[in-house]
Amino acid sequence: MSASNTIAAGSVVSIHYKLTLDDGNVVDSSEGRDPLSYLHGQGNIVAGLEEALTGQAVGADLKVTVSPEQGYGARDDRAVQTVPRGAFPPDAQLKEGLSFQARDEAGRPLMGTITKLEGDEVTVDFNHPLAGQNLHFEVSITEIRAATEEEISHGHVHGPGGHHH
Ligand code: ZN
């Protein structure tokens, strides 16, 4: 496999990044860590950022604003549900703001956040915490290499910054 100069489907891309919301709050950053490595063209990162990185080269610094539609989706009021307290383990320390892992009907992992506790009723928001937000990314591209056949068949990156089996 030859090294690629620009980002295309099948590139393994390493980036340093900072994610800021409209209110200026930094919610994620690779500062002080290894760069994030991902497999381009597989939806491993949000669609709007992946699109902006296509065709870019090592050393490029980008500022990209991603709309909710190209990011973590619009907020969905139907994803806010009220469940009985008995749906949680008896020893669970429930409190507003608590996030926990659940599964949807298809068994896919889902993050829920408790937004209200009232008597026997627990209100849970299953929207992604960044749903409905504009995402402001600052990205520097540190490395681009061609993915191995194994990485392409798995749909993710192996080795440093990626998946370890
Ligand atoms: Zn793998």
Image (cartoon, rainbow, N blue to C red):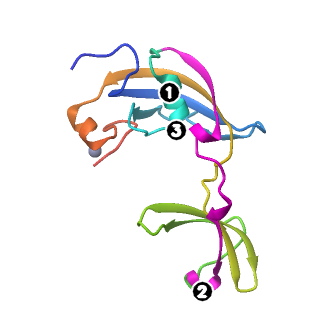
Sequence order check, earlier mark of 2 and 3: 3
**Magenta stretch: residue 34 in it?**
no
Query: Which of the 4 image quadrants contains residue 115?
Result: bottom right
Depth check, front residue: 34 or 123: 123
Kind of residue sitting beneath label 2: Gly
Dot 2 surroundings within 10 Å: few (below 14), some, or many (20 or more)?
Answer: few
| SS for callout 2 | helix
Kind of residue sitting beneath label 1: Glu
Please name the residue that numbered disc 3 is placed on: 46
| Location of residue 156 with respect to 14 vertically, above or below | below
Dot 3 surroundings within 10 Å: few (below 14), some, or many (20 or more)?
Answer: some
Kind of residue sitting beneath label 3: Val
Please name the residue that numbered disc 1 is placed on: 51
Q: Which residues are magenta?
A: 59-88
| Location of residue 107 with respect to 134 vertically, above or below | below
Depth check, front residue: 116 or 58: 116
Sequence order check, earlier mark of 2 and 1: 1
Sequence order check, earlier mark of 1 and 3: 3
| SS for callout 3 | loop
**Magenta stretch: residue 83 in it?**
yes
Residue 153, position as x, y percentages in the image: 24, 40
Q: Residue at x 75, y 85 (%)?
A: 119
Q: Residue at x 34, y 40 (%)?
A: 156
Q: Which mark is residue 165?
A: none
Give the side of residue 33 with respect to residue 85, left or right. Answer: left
Cα distance between the residues tagged 2 and 3: 35 Å
Dot 1 surroundings within 10 Å: few (below 14), some, or many (20 or more)?
Answer: some
